[in-house]
Image (cartoon, rainbow, N blue to C red):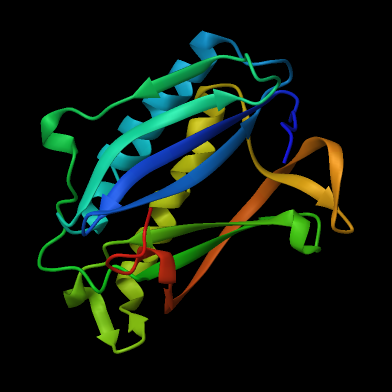
Amino acid sequence: MPFQPVPNVMAGVMHFQIGGQHAQNTYHYQKTSPASQADCQALANALLNTLWAAHLKALVTPDVALTDFTVTALDSQTAPIAVATPIPGDVNGTGAGTSVPSGSALVATFVTAQRSRNGRGRIYLAGVPSGQMADPIEVASGYLTSFLAALQFLFTIGTAVSATLVVVSRELNKIQRPTGIGIPVTGITADRLVDSQRRRLGGRGT
């Protein structure tokens, strides 16, 4: 697929490992003009320090190891890129106990004003502590509350870097758009059900 620009949007990719398998979540933010190198670095630092170190790290077990947050401006193939790497004490999760299987995760949905599939996004929380399972398929309600509270800081990060959390739509009616568009996120939802992710099973990840 040829490069597709997404004007004024930065993609913040969280690279991590769970049980030795590589995985990632991507968070998109849109500014009112093309992002600079400083904008990308500010977003990378905020995702590392505010999202991961201050909030998500405590929700996952040490089986999760953060590699970095890489932020790329999507205006062109030569747009700025910035990376933020954790200090040694912030690499691994600090949640107690062992993780549920690596192919399992909580799923959060990014909601927008558009009801189509193009108007929704998802991120995944791997490394859920087994002690936070209320039954074989659901996490405890308090754990879900903490997860959703942590994700609310994605909006705080957007304010701090003068950008809006968005879902990127790259297709319309299954046809690639000439340029992708950012759709503002209006809310973040999740339920207690633990979903499966086959690519994070041992030996199947990339």
The x, y position of residue 37, in whole percent, is 52, 10
Residue drawn at the location 76% of the way across and 45% of the way down: 170
**204 on left or right of 170:** left
The x, y position of residue 160, in whole percent, is 50, 24
Q: Nearer the viewer, residue 53 or 122?
A: 122
**114 on left or right of 20:** right
Q: Is residue 197 visible?
A: no
Residue drawn at the location 61% of the way across and 33% of the way down: 29
**134 on left or right of 152:** left
Residue drawn at the location 42% of the way across and 26% of the way down: 44
Query: Where on the picture, by quarter, is residue 5?
Result: top right
Q: Is residue 83 above or below residue 139?
A: above
Q: Is residue 17 above or below residue 39?
A: below
Q: Is residue 129 visible?
A: yes
Number of numbered discs overlaid on the protein picture: 0
The x, y position of residue 78, in whole percent, is 62, 14
Q: Nearer the viewer, residue 176 or 49?
A: 176
Residue drawn at the location 41% of the way across and 55% of the way down: 149
Query: Where on the picture, by quarter, is residue 135?
Result: bottom left
The x, y position of residue 196, in whole percent, is 42, 75
Q: Nearer the viewer, residue 181 or 138?
A: 181
